Amino acid sequence: MKRPIYDDELHAQFVTFSCYRRRRLLDHPRARQIVLSFLTLELQASGGVCSGFVVMPNHVHAIIWFPIPRQVSSFMKQWKQRSSLQLKRFLRGQLGQYALSTDRKDPFWQPSYYPFNLYSEHKALEKLNYMHNNPVNAGLVESPCGWSHGSARYYERGESVGVPLEWIF
């Protein structure tokens, strides 16, 4: 059964997607940076806005918004497709163990993503805090700002995080 995606009302979306079989394919900082570079490129290409993100070792969360309805699916398709090609190239070239542990035919990402319609600022803040605390809860860092592949430093310290951010609520 296909999941409905509610992006007709120009609400922001909290999206989540995972590496194939929840593998930790994003353990290497360069792999996480590749995901973020394609987030930035696809936002620019689509006129979208990002309000927050975190790239974990096996999944990604982001809050995205588009000024035109029904853009989420095409944006996600492009972000995942383009990043997967570069990620596979990086992992095969730089991390030989990856090439030995996976089948070349395996996709990089799980085939779907999970959107959550952010209809209020309260819900958006709830999801932003959830995202930022994800690396802490996973035991990767002691504070959200300690994780270099998330937007917490932007909100807590005003630091650049490599992805243009805008709070749209």
Image: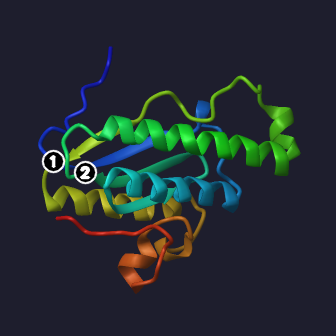
Q: Mark 2 sits on what residue?
A: 66
Residue drawn where x is 31% and y is 55% of the image: 47
For residue 77, which quarter of the picture? top left
Relative image position of residue 32 (x, y in whole percent):
61, 57
Residue closer to the observer: 22 or 66: 66
Give how far apart the Cα atoms at labels 2 and 1 are. 7 Å
For residue 154, which quarter of the picture? bottom left
Does residue 23 appear to the left or right of 59 in the view shown?
right
Instruction: Give yes or no for contact between labels 2 and 1 (Cβ–Cβ under 8 Å).
Output: yes
- Helix, strand or loop at label 1? It is loop
- Helix, strand or loop at label 2? It is loop
Q: Say which amino acid is labelled 1.
A: Leu
Q: In this view, does 40 lie above or below 157?
A: above
Q: How crowded is mark 2: few (under 14 residues within 10 Å), some or many (20 or more)?
A: many
Q: Can residue 24 be seen in this view?
A: no
Residue drawn where x is 41% and y is 43% of the image: 16
Relative image position of residue 30 (x, y in whole percent):
69, 60
Q: Mark 1 sits on what residue?
A: 10
